[in-house]
Image (cartoon, rainbow, N blue to C red):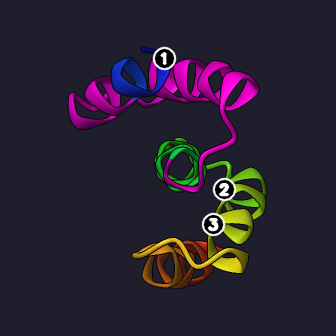
Amino acid sequence: VWASLGFCQLQQGKDSEAATSLERALNLDPSLKIFRYLATALMNLGDYSAATEACSMAVKNGEPGAISLQERITARLP
């Protein structure tokens, strides 16, 4: 439920709420897709360090789309 809520919040541009929901979801089920969604929310919030950390879990374990997300995060680093 938390993952679905977080995904919906992410789609609505509610990145802060999405990050909170997705972090709760990860506590219950450390799914790679949730790491990718969390990385997206954190990137949108400008927390590139945390976004990189979340995304690296997804990349390391082969989550589809995670590598391109990691590249987008890296491009935004100062």
Relative to residue 12, is residue 30 drawn left or right? right
Q: Which type of secondary structure does the marked residue at label 2 adopt?
A: helix
Circle 2 or circle 1, nearest the eye: 1
Few, some or many residues within 10 Å of mark 2 (<14, 14–19, 20+): many
From what the image shows, is residue 28 above or below residue 62? Answer: above
Q: What residue type is labelled 2?
A: Ala
Secondary structure state at the residue bearing disc 3: helix
**10 Å neighbourhood of mark 3: few (<14), some, or many (≥20)?**
many
- The quarter of the picture where the N terminus appears is top left
Give residue 73's mark: none
Assign the C terminus to one quadrant of the image: bottom right
Q: Residue at x 75, y 24 (%)?
A: 27
**Is 75 above or below relative to 14?**
below
Type of amino acid under label 1: Trp
Give the amino acid at mark 3.
Ala
In the rendered image, which residue does mark 1 sit on?
2
User: Real-space Cα distance between discs 2 and 3?
Assistant: 11 Å
Would you identify the image quadrant in which residue 56 lies? bottom right
Residue indicated by mark 3 = 58
* Residue bearing mark 2: 51
- The magenta span reads 7-33
User: Tag count in the figure?
Assistant: 3
Q: Earlier in the sequence, mark 2 or mark 1?
A: 1
Precedes in sequence: disc 3 or disc 1: 1
**Crowd rating for badge 1 (residues with CA inside 10 Å; few <14, some 14–19, many 20+):** some
Helix, strand or loop at mark 1: helix
Task: Return the x and y of residue 22 as percentages of the image width and height.
Answer: 56, 29
Residue 51 relative to residue 67: left or right: right
